[in-house]
Amino acid sequence: MSVGAGTALQRSRPVTTLRCVGTLDRQTRHHLVTVVEQMLRRDPATVTVDVGALELADGEAGSALAEVERMVKDAGAEMHWHGVRADHLRKSPTLRPRLGARSAE
């Protein structure tokens, strides 16, 4: 590979995916936030979080998902949610599933 004078190499920003399984609640929310903080250190272009197998136990769980979305957007990355269900939206009404993604009740 040759690079001419005045040509800058652009580094490709990674796409990261996180699949959440189990129950998210007041006691476990900090684990999710910490993992996302670590993911954001890689400066991803897109962060995809699959919550299809995640149960939201309380309002703290819903607020954790909202915090994740805010963190990703503040980092300048695009946020995608997969597997968002009606019960997720009851606890975290600001979640916006990716258009075209499957959402189930």
Image (cartoon, rainbow, N blue to C red):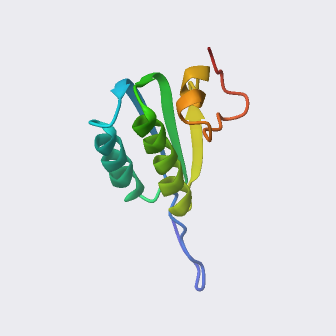
Q: Which residue is drawn at 45% across and 35% down?
A: 59
Q: Which residue is drawn at 65% across and 21% down?
A: 102
In the foreground, 102 or 8: 102
In the rendered view, tell whether residue 100 sits above or below residue 35: above
User: Where residue 73 sits in the image (x, y, percent)?
Assistant: 56, 57
Instruction: Locate residue 45: give its quadrant.
Output: bottom right
**Direction from residue 58 to residue 90 in the image, left or right:** right
User: Where residue 101 sits in the image (x, y, percent)?
Assistant: 67, 27
- In the displayed orientation, state which residue is furthest to the top: 105
Q: Which residue is drawn at 53% across and 54% down?
A: 70
In the rendered view, tell whether residue 71 sits above or below residue 58: below
**Direction from residue 30 to residue 49 in the image, left or right:** right
**Direction from residue 30 to residue 74 in the image, left or right:** right
Q: Quadrant of the C terminus?
A: top right
User: Where residue 94 sits in the image (x, y, percent)?
Assistant: 62, 41
In the rendered view, tell whether residue 64 sits above or below residue 91: below
Q: How many marks?
A: 0
User: Where residue 50 sits in the image (x, y, percent)?
Assistant: 49, 30
In the rendered view, tell whether residue 20 sits above or below residue 33: above
Instruction: Locate residue 20: give its quadrant.
Output: top left
Q: Residue at x 55, y 67 (%)?
A: 10
- In the displayed orientation, state which residue is furthest to the right: 100
- In the displayed orientation, state which residue is furthest to the bottom: 5
In the foreground, 82 or 67: 67
